[in-house]
Amino acid sequence: MNIYKDNRVGQGSRGRGKTISKNSESGSQQRSHMVTNTKKETRFQWFFQRAELPDGQYDPETGTGLLCIEELSKKDKGIYRAMVSDDRGEDDTILDLTGDALDAIFTELGRIGALSATPLKIQGTEEGIRIFSKVKYYNVEYMKTTWFHKDKRLESGDRIRTGTTLDEIWLHILDPKDSDKGKYTLEIAAGKEVRQLSTDLSGQAFEDAMAEHQRLKALAIIEKNRAKVVRGLPDVATIMEDKTLCLTCVISGDPTPEISWLKNDQPVTFLDRYRMEVRGTEVTITIEKVSSDDSGRYGVFVKNKYGSETGQVTISVFKHGDEPKELKSM
């Protein structure tokens, strides 16, 4: 027995209708239901596949129950139930979001996404030249994209990459050549909606993109090959006097970096108790029979034609019977 419909007050049945709306800004879905004949104690709940959805909203002033699903996908397929209840009983309404109903929503979202596509933009990258359009929503199952160069359909290959994200459709031309100049067209199909966007990669547009590509490529080469201290040195090394201290770090760079050590910003002379050993990319400094005079801030400085870097460590030497400084501070 439907208690609400049997106990008619005001307009009678609690459920007054349900609607589905699409948010063209984000591709989200909003499901809403209007209820009447409520009172202060009335409770509104949303369920999906019999499990309660805690994110549902209810406005008792307007009688509107709202459920918003961000980035709708196939995992949201199922039965939705909106229920109101109080001491008089309960009433509900069902939304079957499966089959054709779900397909219709995705098709409409695809149409909105296609219409939202921004004009094509050209961008130089480290790897080449990128052409792209921003969209408010993209679904690979319900939207299809095709790229053309001079009216010839393009396929992904060794130098051509195409792809999509939730908010972008892109084409990446690797290692660009003069033969890549010309008109590029993006075709977006979503149901019966087909949209085409074009841009001309020639003249100044091509020159600007190539200049940016060359600049970023050069920076990447510098960053890859410059001298670096990649790992190994601690922030602080504590040791008892008369012990032998060994510190090892790993460096990188092409050509092989020049290496020097500093103590309190002054060059370290490797004589007597101080030794440096280089094995491939590993650099080790050894100090024998350390004393308090060896305490200080040390740095390994590496450089080559692409750049330089310093890795630093603070060495603290304590006397027999004393505690290390960091233990005293604990």
Image (tube, rainbow, N blue to C red):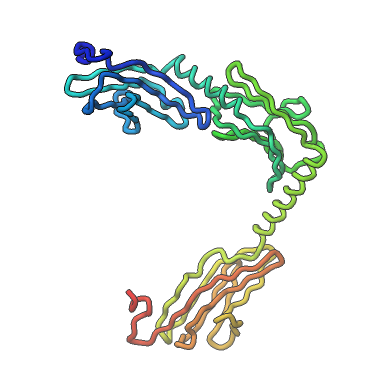
Q: Quadrant of the N terminus?
A: top left
* Of residues 87 and 74, the one drawn nearer to the viewer in this rendering: 87
Classify 190 as above or below 224. Answer: above
Whether residue 139 sits left or right of residue 174 in the image: it is left
Percent of width and height locating residue 14: 28, 17
Residue at image coords 38%, 28%: 67
Can residue 285 be seen here? Answer: yes
How many numbered tags mark residues here?
A: 0
Q: Give coordinates of residue 34: x percent, y percent.
A: 34, 20
Residue 163 appears in the figure: no
Q: Residue at x 76, y 25 (%)?
A: 151
128 over 224 or under it: above or below: above
- Residue in the foreground of this view, choosing between 301 and 57: 57
Q: Nearer the viewer, residue 319 or 327?
A: 327
Farthest left residue in view: 87
**Residue 317 pos. (x, y %):** 43, 83
In the rendered view, would you say 202 is above or below 319?
Answer: above
The quarter holding residue 271 reads bottom right
Residue 89, picture quadrant: top left
Q: Height in image: 262 above or below 306?
A: below
Q: Position of residue 182 (x, y in %)?
A: 79, 33
Q: Nearer the viewer, residue 44 or 257?
A: 44
Identify the image quadrant of residue 44.
Answer: top left
Quarter of the picture holding the C terminus:
bottom left
